[in-house]
Image: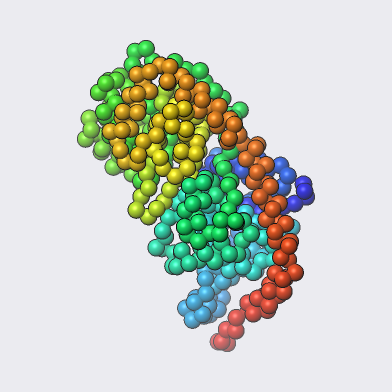
Amino acid sequence: MADRVVASYCTTFLKPEMLHIYRQVRSLQSYRTFVMTKWLQNEDRFPFDDIELIPKPHINPLRHGWLKFVKRKSPIEYRGEYQMLASLLERRGADLMHIYFGHTGVHLLPFIERWSRPCVVSFHGADVASKPEIRDYARKLKRLFKSVPLVLSRSHSLSQRLISLGCPPEKLRLCRTGVPLRQFEFVRREAPADGRWRLLQACRLIPKKGVATTLCAFAIFQKEFPKAELVIAGKGPLQGHLEELAEELGIASKVQFRGFLTQGELMELYASAHIFVHPSETPPDQNQEGIPNSVLEAMSTGLPVVATTHGGIPEAVEHGRGGLLVEERDFESLATALKEIARSKNAFREMGLLGSEYVAGNFEQSAQIRSLEAHYTEAVELAGERKPAAQAVSARVAQSYVEQVPAK
C-alpha cells in the first residue's frame, strides 16, 4: 500500500482559500503524492517539496487551428496536452490521479476517458454552480461522472446537488475537510462583563459568504451592545461595497476589515473573539458551500457559531448545541440569534464546548485522511476489475487519437 502513488492535480497551487487542499496533500500516510499544477502561487504560505509544474506545450499553429476550428476538439487536445500529461504520469509511476474541482475534471475529460489508470474528482462548492463560460458544462459533467470510478464530495448537501446534476449515487463518497486539532485547541472563554462582544467572520468577500447580511445583523446587535465590534478577516471583490454598506449603516467605526491573515494571526483572532458569524447564502448560479473551513476551525477553538441553513453548514453546526442557525438572507433573525447567545452566559459557554467536541468527533484530520485514502484504494480496485476491457478500448482510442492534418 505504501508504494502506491497518487498524483494530486490542482490547476493553481494554491490560492489562499485552498488551505484544505494543502492539508490533504501534506497529510497522506498510506499513499505518496506529488502535485501537478500549471501555476504556482503563495509558495511561502504553502511550501511543498514535490511539485511538477506542467509546461506549456509547443503548439503547431496549423494543427492547433485544424483541431480547434475544424474538428472542434477540446482545449486539452488542440493545445497538445494529452501526451505531455500521459508521459509525466508514466514517469512518476502514478497509480491514480486526484483532480481537485469539477470544472478542472471537465477540462481534463478527454484525458480521463483515455488514460489507462483511474481518476477521482473532488467537488468543493463553486464547481456545482452553473458555468456559462464553459460550453455544455452540465452535459460534460455527466460524461465526467461516467468516466471516473468515484466522485468525492465535501458534504451531503453537495452530494445531493451532484445527484441532481446526473452523478450516480453509487459513485459518490463523502470526503470531509479535516481539521488539525492540535493547531486549533479549545480556548476557555467568558462572556465580556463590560459588553465588549467581539464578533468574527473569516472568509472571502464574495456573494455566497453573506457578509452584507452579517453587517446588517451587527447594526441591530450593537444597538443593544454598543461596545461590540465586528472583525471581518478576508479579501475579495465585494470589499468596497461592504465598506460602503458599513458607512451607510453607521457602524464603520465598529467594523474592522483585516484582509487575508496568516494562520497565526487568524488563531489569535479566534482566541480573542466571542461569537463566529457565517451566514452563507446561495447566489443565482447555485454556487454553494461544502462545509466552510473557518466554521470548523472556529468551533474547534470553542467559538459558538451563528450561521445559516445553507449547504453543508448544518452538518457541522447542530442548531441549539454548537450554535444557532437561521434562514439565508434573514439579517433580523441573525441579529436575534446573536443577541440570544449574548444574553445567556450559560448558552454561550455550553455551545462553545459542545461545538468543539463535535468537530473533534467528526472532522479530526487524521480520520478524514484515512477515509480519503480508503477511497483511493477503492478507486484503484474498481478500475482493476474493469482493466481488461478498458485496455482494449484504450488501445483503440489511442490508435484513433492522432488526427490527420493537411500538409502545408
In the figure, is residue 47 to the left or right of 386? left
Q: What's the residue at 50%, 55% (across, down)?
A: 162
How many numbered callouts? 0
Q: Position of residue 30 (x, y in %)?
A: 73, 44
Residue at figure coordinates x 58%, y 38% from the top left:
178
Q: Nearer the viewer, residue 378 or 274?
A: 378
Which residue is at the far top? 193
Name above or below for residue 345 compared with residue 385.
above
Q: Which residue is at 49% across, 52% downward?
A: 160
How was the colour assigned to the protein in this rendering?
Answer: rainbow
The percent position of residue 101, horizontal first and vertical second, equals: 53, 54
Q: Nearer the viewer, residue 133 or 371?
A: 371
Is 189 situated above or below 293?
above
Percent across and percent down for residue 385 are 73, 62
The image quarter in which residue 247 lies = top left
Note whether residue 336 is visible: yes
**Which quadrant of the rendered structure holds the C terminus?**
bottom right
Q: Is residue 97 left or right of residue 77?
A: right
**Closer to the camera in the image, 25 or 16:** 25
Q: Is residue 99 visible?
A: no
Determine whether, in the image, residue 185 is placed left or right of residue 6. Answer: left
Quadrant of the image occupied by residue 81:
bottom right
Residue 279 position in % (x across, y down): 38, 38
Picture quarter containing residue 183? top right
Q: Residue at x 43, y 17 (%)?
A: 346
Left or right, residue 26 beside residue 350:
right
Vertical order, 7 against 368 (above or below): below
